[in-house]
Image (cartoon, helix red, strand yellow):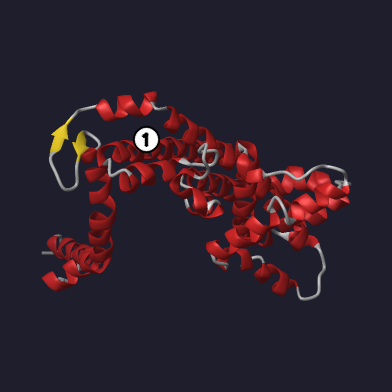
Amino acid sequence: MTVTAPATATLISVRKTRRRDRPPSRIRQSFGERIAPYVYIAPFFVIFAIFGLFPLVFTFYVALFDWNPIGEQTFVGLANFERLFQDPRFWNAFVNTFGIFLISTIPQLLLALGLAHLLNHATLKWANFFRMALLVPYITSVAATALVFAQIFDRNFGLINWVLNIFGIPDVNFLSSQVGSWIVISSMVMWRWFGYNTLLYLAGLQALPREMYEAASVDGASGWQQFIHLTIPSLRPIIIFTVIMSTIGGLQIFTEPLLVAPESGLTCGGGRQCQTLALFLYEQGFGQFEFGYGSAIGVALFLIVVVVSLINFYLTTRTRKAR
């Protein structure tokens, strides 16, 4: 008994210690509590499936047919895509889309980045007012913007031609040429979106510590050196985001070219000088009622967006590795 008593007391203390260290058992949840989170997020997925996923899959399906909305639907396989790549109108719209995108996006983002840097460092009265005023172009109606810019670039009474006449340059009919129409549409896109991108850059700049710039100033770095070596690397994720979003939006541009030349309809000029891929898709699908061919154009646009998304993934991965 003198030997087993201490052993029994030790065993009891070990069991008590294990009970204290054991985590509490999970509270049993009812079926309703377990299913509730899925019910909360279900509306988004249901709406996305109806208005996003189904139209996308159905577009791929219709692209394989000679689709008559009120008649027969004949399966043609890849014939619509073969016709697409042999159609000069498609390549003309492709060139117009990327031309407008390049002219509008690059100057827009550079202007937004410079203006955000200026607003972040400059000491201004009513600074918040000027920052919020950047959203005025974004909330302005696209139709009103198109009307104003059509008057600015008007051949006979436009402000741009009036300035050109001061320097002895004759009147220019911008909408009659391909490059001229690109300039008009790109100006509208820049006016509408540069303020939005400026606020994104400004929000990123205000999150940076002031001590970083003060230390750089003490080390003798100029303002330009601080901008190149501190500001741009710190804003790299936001810059990538704005570049990709501007690219996707530029590839889908529709309203501006449609409103800038309303008398031409969906062709955006007699020579299709400013017709984009989105306009060409709408013309073939709802203008000519060739839904199969229009769906093939939509599939081509979708593949372009996929390529841009892959580039976004690559750039994001590269940025994370650089950190």
- Residue 149, x across and y down, in percent: 64, 57
| In the rendered image, the vertical position of residue 184 relative to residue 307, given as above or below | below
Observer-nearest residue: 166 or 304? 166
Task: Report the residue at 71% width, 57% height from top.
Answer: 116
Task: Give the secondary structure at mark 1.
Answer: helix
* Quadrant, the C terminus: top right
Which quadrant of the view contains residue 194?
A: bottom right
Left or right of 2, for residue 101 = right
- Residue 222, x across and y down, in percent: 86, 47
- Residue 294, x across and y down, in percent: 32, 40
Which residue corresponds to mark 1?
Answer: 300
- Residue 93, x across and y down, in percent: 48, 36
Left or right of 150, for residue 215 = right
**Residue 30 in view (yes/no):** no
Three-letter code for the amino acid on which mark 1 is drawn: Ala
How many numbered tags mark residues here?
1
Q: Residue lying furthest front in this view?
A: 156
| In the rendered image, the vertical position of residue 71 relative to residue 140, given as above or below | above
Left or right of 43, for residue 227 = right
* Quadrant, the N terminus: bottom left
The local crowd at label 1, few if under 14, some if 14 to 19, many if 20 or more residues have their Cα within 10 Å, is: some
Task: Report the residue at 80% width, 43% height from top.
Answer: 170
**Residue 112 in view (yes/no):** yes
Task: Report the residue at 81% width, 63% height from top.
Answer: 122
